[in-house]
Amino acid sequence: MSQINELQNMNIKVNENCSLEKPGIYKILNTTNGKYYIGSTTMRAYKRIQHHYEMLKVGKHKNQHLQNAWNLYGIDAF
């Protein structure tokens, strides 16, 4: 699956001047309640965000607040 297709499946929106192929700061937004998780990475942002989604899907994310929201609202809220 291409990077673009994966991003669409993960409901990730990228700002015009940003690149997911570089390190940076990112936000995971809960579109249901407006709360968000801010993170930063020294690796490619795409890979880090992908890791968050993988951990959330299996219920093992290190941030319990984010995991609880994921469990409550589901993937479509993020």
Image (cartoon, rainbow, N blue to C red):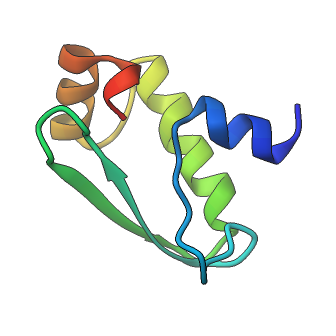
Residue 50's spot in the image, x, y percent?
61, 43
Residue lying farthest right?
Answer: 1
User: Residue drawn at (31%, 28%), measured in percent from left and top?
Assistant: 77
Quadrant housing residue 19: bottom right
**Extreme-bottom residue of the structure:** 17
Using the rendered view, name the quadrant where residue 26 is placed.
bottom left
Horizontal arrangement in the rendering, residue 37 relative to residue 47 (left or right):
left
Q: Return the residue nearer the eye: 44 or 27.
A: 27
Which residue does the image show at 22% across and 52% down from the upper left? 36
Give the answer, above or below, for where 18 lies relative to 28: below
Horizontal side, residue 41 vs residue 34: left or right: right
> Which residue is located at x 47 percent, y 20 percent?
57
Specify the quadrant that holds the N terminus. Answer: top right
The location of residue 68, given as percent across then percent down, is 18, 25
Judge by depth and name the residue closer to the eye, 13 or 74. 13
The number of numbered badges drawn on the structure is: 0
Query: Residue 32's x, y, as percent?
Result: 18, 32
Q: In which quarter of the image is residue 74?
A: top left
Q: In which quarter of the image is the C terminus?
A: top left
* Residue 64, image x, y percentages: 20, 35
